[in-house]
Amino acid sequence: AQSVTQPDIHITVSEGASLELRCNYSYGATPYLFWYVQSPGQGLQLLLKYFSGDTLVQGIKGFEAEFKRSQSSFNLRKPSVHWSDAAEYFCAVAPAGGNQFYFGTGTSLTVIP
Amino acid sequence: EAGVAQSPRYKIIEKRQSVAFWCNPISGHATLYWYQQILGQGPKLLIQFQNNGVVDDSQLPKDRFSAERLKGVDSTLKIQPAKLEDSAVYLCASSSRTSGRTWYFGPGTRLTVL
């Protein structure tokens, strides 16, 4: 079955430490890939997206993500986390050529001083 | 351009009551989506429209939920009767093949069922 998985429900990191959030997908062809962030009580904000081309994608707020076809992954990274990065992060996929759009279950990020 | 509009932003009802949410997508966007986001979970697709036709409603609890997009523009999602487990944020999104394969999300309607 087609799916998008975020294996980590919750992650805690210290401020200034590096961050990697995992996302794996299961689709027949490489889908379009997205990362969104949602702060408590707020709407979804697009961090970055991948359609094709360079597999390392730069986004807003210092985030980047790397697409790895061999691993069906699209992991989100940030070299130095700030306290304001504490939020819920969602990976999302849109099968190429279609209009469907699906979210993963999310990873909750806590940043400790 | 104006974003996806949703109303109301908040709604509190008692179980077994009815409620309706409205969404106005970005002008010209043919595809419209309704998602349900329960607290602590990712948004779940309820229904997807292409113009005024339903593309996917496999996750819509059809015994109590209904949605329409009669003129292929704005859409209404209704719950009748509501249950406690329907408490969630209901997100509307729209997209267009000419929008650079970008999905635009509304601010959501937060529903509390007491």
Image (spheres, coloured by chain):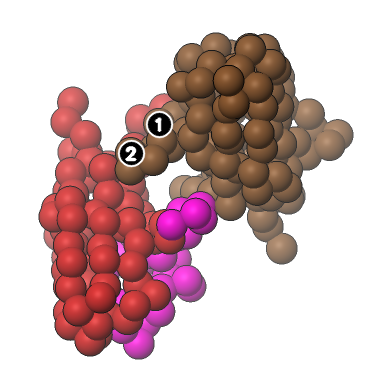
Chain colours: A brown, B red
Q: Position of residue B110 (x, y in %)?
A: 26, 56
Image quadrant assignment for residue B101: top left
Element marked by disc 1: strand
Residue B19 among those drawn in magenta? no
Amino acid type, callout 2: Gln
Seen in the image, is A31 located left or right of residue B2? right
Q: Mark 1 lies on which chain?
A: A
Q: Nearer the viewer, residue B27 or A12?
A: A12
Residue plotted at (26% across, 43% down): B107
Horizontal and vertical percent position of residue A41 = 33, 43
Query: Residue A42 shows which numbered tag?
Result: 2
* Residue stretch in magenta: B39-68
Q: Residue at x 25, y 75 (%)?
A: B114
* Image quadrant assignment for residue A76: top right
Could you tell me how far apart the alpha carbons at marks 1 and 2 are, in whole angstroms? 9 Å
Q: Which residue is drawn at 67% across and 55% down?
A: A3
Looking at the picture, which amino acid does disc 1 mark? Gln
Q: Do the residues labelled 1 and 2 touch (CB within 8 Å)?
A: yes
What is the chain identity of the residue bearing mark 2?
Answer: A
Residue at (69% x, 16% y) in the render: A17
Give coordinates of residue B45: x percent, y percent: 45, 60
Q: Is residue B9 visible?
A: yes
On residue A45, the disc is 1
x%, y% of residue A95?
A: 59, 46
SS type, badge 2: loop
Q: Which circle, 1 or 2, is nearer the viewer?
A: 2
